[in-house]
Image (cartoon, helix red, strand yellow):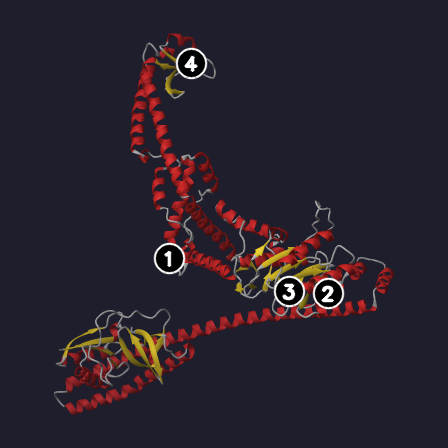
Amino acid sequence: MKIEQRTADLAEITSVLERMSRRTRSEAGRSMLRGMLPAPSIKAARQRQELLKSYARYVETRGELPWDERMKPLGPLLENAGETALLSGVELLPFRILIGLSKRIKESLREARNDIPGVERLAEGIRDLDEEFEKLQVLSDDGELYDGASEKLAELRLSLRDLTSRARSRCAAISVEPSLAPMLQDRVVHFRNGRFALLVRAEDSGRFDGIVLDRSSSGKGVYLEPKELVPLNNRIQVLRREESEEERRILSALTAMILARRLPLLETESAVARIDVLYACDRFLVEPPWTLPELDDRSRFHFKELWNPLIGKECVPVSIHCGERFRQLIITGPNTGGKTVVLKSVAIGIFLALSGFPVPAAEGTQVGWIDFMAADIGDEQGIEQSLSTFSSHIRRIIAMMEKAGKDSLLLLDELGAGTDPQEGAALGIAILEALRERGSLVLATTHHNPIKRYALGSRGVEAAGMEFDPATLAPTFRLIMGLPGKSNALFIADRLGMPMNIIDSAREHLSEETRTGEKVMAELFDKQVELEATGAAMAEERKELASLRRELEEKIRGLDEKQERILEAADKKASAVVDEAEKAALEMLNRLRGASESSARREYGKARKEMQPLKDGLIDRDGSRSKKRMEREGVPRAGDVVRLAGTEVRGVVESVKGDKATVVAGSMTIEVPLKDLTREKGKAPPQTAGPALVSHVPAPRGVPPSIMVRGMTVDEALPEVEVYLDRAFRAGYGEVVIIHGRGEGILRRAVHSLCRSLPYVDDFRLGNAGEGGYGVTVVSFRR
């Protein structure tokens, strides 16, 4: 979207950007945000939004990206480098800081790429500057060159330290010599003009063998360089000059390197500044009611509860739209009633939305593509051209109309004001009609009744009014869509104590048509206000009812789940009792087998018959719970992740037929009754890459790679398992799976006992974690 700087200033967009920029942490980020322009296309605006969403997701899951508060703008430093060809270590340090920070940001985003798709796009523009970063490591955090910056510098500094130590030691020794000590003001080794010296009393300076370097501030002492230190001091000064030359050479080389990589450095700085801008914008996203609007290709807008960020919490939010049923919206109402604030708020909202930023509005806000936005707001006069307010407005509107097209938005404040009301209204209507023919979006405010009537009687034009409270004689700043605002001049004059005869006389000066029209519009406006208030109250009630319903459903769901857990625990305990009784009956049968097998079997059958109603009751309750669970969660469908009840087997439903489902679990495919499946949350279990459960020989028709006997008794299950294993062996399977469930392990032990007795079974084992665990047995055949 194109927007002139004057429009940005008039609508106070510049002030909003300035406030937003205070949330940034760097000068580069602040400059970028202050100078931000809307995206050149709706696609680019969406891309900016996606960047902000990616940043917000990163912060939400991993915390803030790395940052360094020491960042400084590179532009002035590069200009200085171009002029002098030499930057100091302190001036070079910001380049190292920027490159190091950009590397850490890029690495952090790379680590998050698997968790946050598209997050690496935040690093776009960060250039590869590893070599430059390595060379800048010769600088300390204070901007000083390390000794290792070059071999020569290391040698020079080593020699300097040695000579300095010797000179200091010799000075200290001289200061304690009996013949010289009385002449000294103190025994401190001083450093003057780059040379080591002692502070000698002024009256004794003639007797001290040395060279005068300086006088003390009091004049009572003289800094003298002992004669025997002159060669050492001379050598130190030579080495210091050589050190300075070597440092200059290194810094000059680093400066040349920086200048050669000027463009990649500026691009990297811009990329890091963009991260800072996203940081500032994200701060607004976490402060409702800021929100990211839905962007549309059509030239329109629909703001929900839009407010002006420059006014803050005191601003009354407005819901306003234009571009769907109508392309022009004419707003009327009292002075200081908020009309101009609405214009500015819309301009701010559209600018921010098409910049990819959050807008100060509620969720559900939509903003379409606006290719050009211009505003004529306020009472600016062209002083230089000696133009009146009216002339200034007209020139401004002419310039705006020259650029306006069907996807443009023009904001016109007090259209037709500043001149004769009749001529001003006529000119205003003509301007609106010309813009209507072009299809431009127009948001205008006015006081003129003819323009109000134009809004009510023209196709593609809508009226809106700012509400006025007659009780307080003050505007409420609420926008009422659909009708122009009421005229309140006579009413206000009456309430303020104007004599009634003057009020009546004023009414007589109004035409009958005007009086009737104003009365009808006032009644309609009041009805509209009443309807909107009723609608708002109903919406609030619906919202409250929906919240209560969700809360109630959550409580019911929690009670159902709690009841199911209690029943499952009770049934498990009861099943254990029944299985234990069945086991005791089987043991009794074995004891009696030798004496009278037929009578023992009768006793065992009688015991089983007595226990069966208990087992049936458990099964019925289990089935009832399964039915309730399916009613609550829904019948499993293809693609759902499910768990087989009583086992650790998890898989994905491949298909559903009747009351059974085909489930793929790891490398096996099984057919399971729907009532035995529980829908699970989360991702599908990975396909195991272990040994195949089915041999390379194709399975013959009717012989699946697994059998499920969960829920059967030992007597019911063993014959079926034996027949199945025999058929599977003959079919050529290498391995098959028996699904018996976990329970108390009675059926599992019986299955294992059967496997030991079959000659064609080579081995058997419990399933691994990905195969079903203790709930299944994997059987291997001899080959």
Describe the element under mark 4 as helix, strand or loop.
strand
Q: Give the Cα distance between marks 2 and 3.
A: 21 Å
Left or right of 614 on screen, residue 255: right
The residue singled out by tag 2 in the image is: 452
Q: Is residue 646 visible?
A: no
Q: Check disc 1 and give the amino acid type.
A: Ala
Which residue: 46% across, 72% down? 555
Q: Is residue 116 visible?
A: yes
The residue singled out by tag 1 in the image is: 112
In front: mark 3 or mark 1?
3
The answer to whether mark 3 and mark 1 are in CB contact below 8 A is no
In front: mark 3 or mark 4?
3
Describe the element under mark 1 as helix, strand or loop.
loop
Q: Which mark is residue 222?
A: 4
The residue singled out by tag 3 in the image is: 438
Examine the rendered structure and indicate whether residue 139 appears above or below residue 297: above
Where the N terminus falls, by quadrant?
A: bottom right
Q: Check disc 2 and give the amino acid type.
A: Lys
Q: Give the Cα distance between marks 4 and 2.
A: 94 Å
The answer to whether mark 2 and mark 3 are in CB contact below 8 A is no
Q: Nearer the viewer, residue 774 or 522?
A: 522
Q: Give the Cα distance between marks 4 and 1.
A: 68 Å
Q: Check disc 4 and give the amino acid type.
A: Val
